[in-house]
């Protein structure tokens, strides 16, 4: 009888945990479903494993429009523009005067960016749980159901319905965080913002140089 009670207790505990997880994924999915477009400034930092401090790797502006369109403009450490137009992703290194282009499917396959601009339900790829709430920011932990290339875990920080942070841990234990500020949720953004035409005189490589 005691073993039965223990078994029932474990079952109820598991159901409770599953209920929390279901609520977390539904809440985060609801925030993403209501996101049509977004613009923000960003700072990308990484954790220095020796000192434990944060090191700034990049700064710039970003904008996205669901589905499958985004533009990241890097100002630091060097000028670079990355544009997804719905079919392709363009990488423009201004200093090198070079443009590389890949198919959207190849670029997004293992990218955390797919969470923000894609339409695939989170529950198909991730186990989602809600972690702590700190300074009015709700943190959600996303663990891939199948090993993803490049990262092993993600955390998304949401204040209300506003994205404020995206944290990633890669397979080597390196921690990267994108912090967003001046965030505008669902602004009107012209379609030309997600169109890229290589400037005259630059080298274009990839996808057979777009034919």
Image: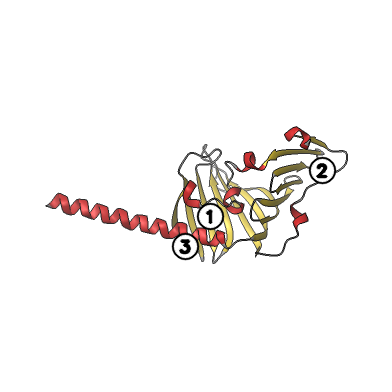
Q: Hey, which quadrant is residue 93 in on the image?
A: top right
Q: Secondary structure at mark 1?
A: strand
Question: Does the residue at mark 1 contact the one at mark 3 (Cβ under 8 Å)?
Answer: no
Q: Secondary structure at mark 2?
A: loop
Residue 17 placement (x, y as % from top left):
35, 55
Identify which residue is drawn at 59% across, 46% down. 46
Which of pointers 1 and 3 lies earlier in the amino acid sequence?
Answer: 3
Q: Is residue 179 visible?
A: yes
Identify which residue is drawn at 69% across, 65% down. 187
Q: How is the image coloured?
A: secondary structure
Can you identify the residue that label 3 sits on? 133
> Crowding near pointer 1: few (<14 within 10 Å), some, many (20+)?
many
Q: Up-down: is 174 above or below 32? A: above
> Crowding near pointer 2: few (<14 within 10 Å), some, many (20+)?
some
Q: Tell me: 173 left or right of 40.
A: left
Q: CA distance from mark 2 to mark 3?
A: 44 Å
Which of pointers 2 and 1 lies earlier in the amino acid sequence?
Answer: 1
- Report the front residue among 204 and 137: 204
In this rendering, the label closer to the viewer, 1 or 3? 1
Identify which residue is drawn at 88% across, 41% down. 200
Residue 169 placement (x, y as % from top left):
52, 44
> Crowding near pointer 3: few (<14 within 10 Å), some, many (20+)?
few
Residue 211 placement (x, y as % from top left):
79, 35
In this rendering, the label closer to the viewer, 2 or 1? 2
Q: Tell me: 189 left or right of 148.
A: right
Question: Does the residue at mark 2 contact the one at mark 1 (Cβ under 8 Å)?
Answer: no
In this rendering, the label closer to the viewer, 2 or 3? 2
Q: CA distance from mark 2 to mark 1?
A: 33 Å
Q: Which mark is residue 198?
A: 2
Q: Secondary structure at mark 3?
A: strand
Identify which residue is drawn at 65% across, 50% down. 68
Q: Which mark is residue 156?
A: 1
């Amino acid at each position: 009888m005691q073993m039965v009670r223990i078994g029932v207790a474990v079952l109820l505990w598991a159901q409770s945990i599953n209920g929390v997880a279901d609520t977390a994924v539904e809440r985060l999915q609801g925030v993403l479903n209501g996101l049509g477009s977004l613009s923000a400034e960003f700072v990308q930092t990484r954790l220095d494993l020796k000192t434990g401090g944060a090191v700034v790797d990049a700064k710039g502006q970003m904008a996205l429009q669901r589905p499958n369109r985004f533009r990241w403009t890097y100002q630091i450490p060097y000028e670079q523009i990355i544009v997804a137009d719905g079919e392709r992703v363009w990488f423009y290194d201004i200093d090198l005067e070079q443009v590389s282009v890949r198919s959207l499917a190849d670029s997004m396959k293992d990218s955390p960016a797919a969470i923000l601009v894609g339409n695939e339900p989170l529950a198909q790829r991730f186990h989602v749980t809600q972690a702590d709430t700190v300074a009015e920011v709700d943190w959600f932990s996303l663990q891939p159901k199948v090993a993803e290339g490049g990262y092993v875990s993600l955390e998304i920080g949401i204040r209300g319905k506003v994205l404020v942070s995206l944290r990633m841990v890669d397979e080597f234990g390196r921690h990267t965080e994108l912090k967003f500020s001046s965030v505008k949720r669902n602004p009107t953004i012209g379609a030309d913002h997600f169109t890229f035409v290589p400037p005259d005189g630059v080298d274009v490589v990839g996808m057979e140089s777009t034919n």
